[in-house]
Image (spheres, rainbow, N blue to C red):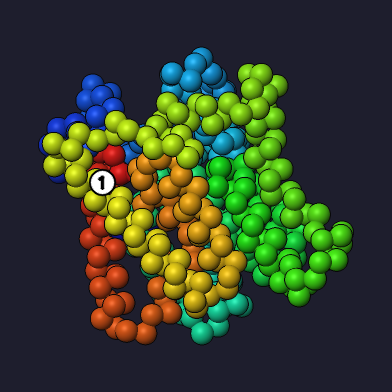
Amino acid sequence: MIIINVFSLLVLNRFNLKPDTAYNWIDPKQFYQDQKWDLVSLHAKWDSFWYLDIVKNGYSFKSIKEPSNIVFFPLYPFLIKSLSYLTFGNLILSGWILSMIFLLAALIYFFKLIKEFHPEIDPYYAIILLLIFPTAFFLNSIYTESLFLFLSIATFYHALKRNFLLAGIFGFFASLSRVTGVLLFIPVLWEYFRNNNFKLNSIFKVKILPIFLIPLGIFSFFLFHYFKFKDFFLFFKAESWFDRVFFKLCKGHFDFFSNSSVANFSLDAFFVVFALIAVYFIFKKLPVSYGLYMIVSSAVIISTGTLMSFGRYILVFFPIYILGASIKNQYLKQAWIFVSILLLSLYTTLFVNNYWAG
């Protein structure tokens, strides 16, 4: 991460770039390259400011026709606020420190998970594949990626160890950090039934109860919407402003006469194909719960009617890196690393220069 941060600082100040034109909703007056030698501030772009707004002003809502911070889950901004007392109110620094802390915690849990449940896999190689994934810079930014990666891996780790109480607790916090966190309920429930030989009477055992902590996280967030804004399903309505409408095709993202739009859409489509291929082989080679986690998460993301940000969303799909580390063909392994590093350089350059990168 030291290398990528030095790289980020250099690419921010090396190019004199015009505002991004990849999407027609990007306002060049608001999103432009801001060159400066500030290592901290370059980690806050795009959605980062929604989390920072929650920290400073709390949740607010005017209309589904206007952008609103209520679609951003509360755990990360709560943690930023808590840490800000130690950073003298510097919220961006607090968020960056938190992301790095949770990235380290995620890597520790990831190492433990591979060593205990995939002893044939080199954990260091899987970690390298994670850190060089094309959108890995988000693990180092004011985004929830590091936090969610840690919580989801921890949830799986304890589910595989049959400690469903801890799995439920970590899953609860995961569903307080992003909407797909609730989907951890499905693979954890699968592991519970698998460990009980899929016996029907296992549904009546007390040990199953902690698993229901996972959906309780998102339920409590929606309940907050109900009490504060009088609408339990306000989240889904507010998402429409961000052109994310579940089970409906969204339009208006691209101007396909723009080269940058075509390039961006092609990259998003590449990640979708990559994820689907990965899901196929994960079901063949790795635990079923891994495949379930990826397929339901991918389906929900795609169901929002846009492929936008898909490359960032699959960053936290840790089974991808276990699958990659299991590849025996040296040419394929080298090609994976080569393409991943190239795209990581591209996406990092885009992000720090205030171009849309997911």
Vertical position of residue 139 compared to residue 285: above or below: above
Amino acid type, mark 1: Phe
Residue visible at 71% across and 52% down? 169
192 to the left or right of 125: right
Give the residue at the far front of this rendering.
248
43 to the left or right of 223: left
Instruction: Name the one closer to the observer, 121 or 279.
Output: 279
Q: Quadrant of residue 43?
A: top left
Instruction: Name the one closer to the observer, 244 or 346.
Output: 244
Secondary structure under the numbered disc 1 in the rendered image: helix
Q: Residues within 10 Å of mark 1 (few under 14, many from 20)?
A: some
Residue 210, how many percent across, how many down?
78, 54
Residue visible at 65% across and 34% down? 221
Residue 278, how many percent across, how many down?
41, 67
Residue visible at 63% across and 66% down? 157
Instruction: Name the one closer to the observer, 310 or 114.
Output: 310
Vertical position of residue 289 compared to residue 185: above or below: below
Residue 90, how many percent across, how many down?
47, 32
Q: Quadrant of the C terminus?
A: top left
Residue 213, how many percent across, how many down?
74, 48
- Name the residue beneath numbered marker 1: 265
Q: Quadrant of residue 65?
A: top left
Residue visible at 56% across and 62% down? 292
**Can residue 344 be seen in the rendering of this structure?**
no
Numbered disc total: 1
Give the residue at the far top of this rendering.
62
**Can residue 279 be seen in the rendering of this structure?**
yes
Vertical position of residue 216 compared to residue 224: above or below: below
193 to the left or right of 175: right
Q: Quadrant of the N terminus?
A: bottom left
